[in-house]
Image (tube, grey):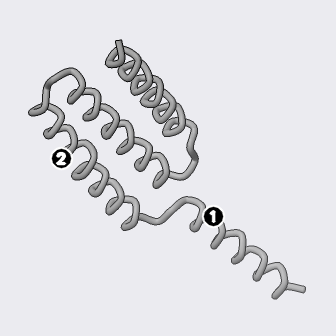
Amino acid sequence: MIYLILTFILILLMIGAAIYAIWQKDLLYAVIASGIISLFLSILFVILQAPDVALTEAAIGVALTTIIFIIAIRNTVRYEDEHDKKVKKKEQLKSAEQ
Protein backbone atom coordinates (compact mmCIF):
# COMPACT_ATOMS: atom_id res chain seq x y z
CA MET A 1 0.00 0.00 0.00
CA ILE A 2 2.81 2.40 0.84
CA TYR A 3 4.46 1.72 -2.53
CA LEU A 4 1.23 2.60 -4.32
CA ILE A 5 0.94 5.91 -2.47
CA LEU A 6 4.60 6.71 -3.10
CA THR A 7 4.17 5.85 -6.78
CA PHE A 8 1.21 8.23 -7.12
CA ILE A 9 3.11 10.99 -5.31
CA LEU A 10 6.08 10.57 -7.66
CA ILE A 11 3.82 10.59 -10.71
CA LEU A 12 2.13 13.79 -9.50
CA LEU A 13 5.52 15.40 -8.87
CA MET A 14 6.64 14.40 -12.37
CA ILE A 15 3.51 15.90 -13.91
CA GLY A 16 4.00 19.09 -11.89
CA ALA A 17 7.63 19.39 -12.98
CA ALA A 18 6.64 18.74 -16.60
CA ILE A 19 4.01 21.50 -16.50
CA TYR A 20 6.58 23.83 -14.91
CA ALA A 21 9.10 23.02 -17.66
CA ILE A 22 6.52 23.74 -20.36
CA TRP A 23 5.36 27.07 -18.93
CA GLN A 24 8.81 28.33 -17.93
CA LYS A 25 10.15 31.13 -20.14
CA ASP A 26 13.76 30.70 -19.05
CA LEU A 27 15.36 27.72 -20.79
CA LEU A 28 17.78 27.02 -17.95
CA TYR A 29 14.95 26.50 -15.47
CA ALA A 30 13.11 24.32 -17.99
CA VAL A 31 16.19 22.09 -18.40
CA ILE A 32 16.58 21.81 -14.62
CA ALA A 33 12.90 20.82 -14.36
CA SER A 34 13.52 18.19 -17.04
CA GLY A 35 16.40 16.82 -14.98
CA ILE A 36 14.14 16.68 -11.93
CA ILE A 37 11.60 14.69 -13.96
CA SER A 38 14.34 12.19 -14.82
CA LEU A 39 15.35 11.99 -11.16
CA PHE A 40 11.78 11.21 -10.08
CA LEU A 41 11.55 8.64 -12.87
CA SER A 42 14.70 6.89 -11.71
CA ILE A 43 13.30 6.75 -8.16
CA LEU A 44 10.10 5.29 -9.61
CA PHE A 45 12.12 2.62 -11.41
CA VAL A 46 13.77 1.65 -8.10
CA ILE A 47 10.33 1.31 -6.50
CA LEU A 48 9.24 -0.86 -9.44
CA GLN A 49 12.30 -3.08 -8.78
CA ALA A 50 14.21 -2.21 -11.94
CA PRO A 51 17.53 -0.98 -10.55
CA ASP A 52 19.42 -1.37 -13.83
CA VAL A 53 16.94 0.88 -15.64
CA ALA A 54 17.04 3.30 -12.70
CA LEU A 55 20.83 3.58 -12.88
CA THR A 56 20.71 4.13 -16.62
CA GLU A 57 18.04 6.80 -16.27
CA ALA A 58 19.99 8.51 -13.51
CA ALA A 59 23.21 8.49 -15.48
CA ILE A 60 21.80 9.50 -18.86
CA GLY A 61 18.63 11.42 -18.02
CA VAL A 62 19.68 13.30 -14.93
CA ALA A 63 23.37 13.80 -15.45
CA LEU A 64 24.44 13.64 -19.06
CA THR A 65 21.43 15.15 -20.82
CA THR A 66 21.05 17.97 -18.31
CA ILE A 67 24.73 18.86 -18.51
CA ILE A 68 24.72 18.86 -22.32
CA PHE A 69 21.64 21.11 -22.42
CA ILE A 70 23.12 23.52 -19.86
CA ILE A 71 26.36 23.76 -21.85
CA ALA A 72 24.39 24.37 -25.05
CA ILE A 73 22.31 27.11 -23.41
CA ARG A 74 25.42 28.71 -21.95
CA ASN A 75 27.13 28.84 -25.35
CA THR A 76 24.21 30.48 -27.16
CA VAL A 77 22.99 34.06 -27.05
CA ARG A 78 19.83 34.40 -25.05
CA TYR A 79 16.90 36.13 -26.70
CA GLU A 80 16.43 38.43 -23.71
CA ASP A 81 20.04 39.63 -23.85
CA GLU A 82 19.88 40.22 -27.58
CA HIS A 83 16.59 42.10 -27.26
CA ASP A 84 17.95 44.28 -24.45
CA LYS A 85 20.99 45.20 -26.54
CA LYS A 86 18.77 46.25 -29.45
CA VAL A 87 16.59 48.40 -27.19
CA LYS A 88 19.64 50.09 -25.63
CA LYS A 89 21.11 50.74 -29.05
CA LYS A 90 17.85 52.35 -30.25
CA GLU A 91 17.73 54.52 -27.13
CA GLN A 92 21.32 55.64 -27.68
CA LEU A 93 20.57 56.54 -31.32
CA LYS A 94 17.51 58.57 -30.26
CA SER A 95 19.48 60.44 -27.61
CA ALA A 96 22.33 61.12 -30.05
CA GLU A 97 19.90 62.57 -32.61
CA GLN A 98 18.48 65.04 -30.10
Of residues 98 and 12, the one drawn nearer to the viewer in this rendering: 12
Please state, as top left, top right, bottom left or bottom right, where the N terminus lies in the image: top left
> Which of the 4 image quadrants contains residue 89?
bottom right
Q: Is residue 32 left or right of residue 16?
A: left
Extreme residue toward the right, this view:
98
Q: What residue is rendered at 20% in x and 38% in y?
A: 57
Q: Secondary structure at mark 1?
A: helix
Total marks shown come to: 2
Q: What residue is rendered at 25% in x and 42% in y?
A: 61
Task: Indicate the amino acid at tag 2.
Answer: Ala
- Mark on residue 83? 1
**Between marks 1 and 2, how big is the CA–CA gap?**
36 Å
Q: What residue is rendered at 29% in x and 57% in y?
A: 67
Front position among marks 1 and 2: 2
Per the image, the residue denoted by label 2 is 59
Extreme residue toward the top, this view:
1
How far across and down, in percent of the image, does residue 68 sit? 27, 56
How far across and down, in percent of the image, does residue 65 sit? 26, 48
In the rendered image of this protein, does residue 58 appear above or below residue 12? Answer: below
In the rendered image of this protein, does residue 5 appear above or below residue 90? Answer: above
- Mark on residue 17? none
Task: Indicate the amino acid at tag 1.
Answer: His
Q: Is residue 52 left or right of residue 14?
A: left
Q: Earlier in the sequence, mark 1 or mark 2?
A: 2
In the rendered image of this protein, does residue 59 appear above or below residue 54? Answer: below
Q: Is residue 75 left or right of residue 68?
A: right
Of residues 53 and 31, the one drawn nearer to the viewer in this rendering: 53
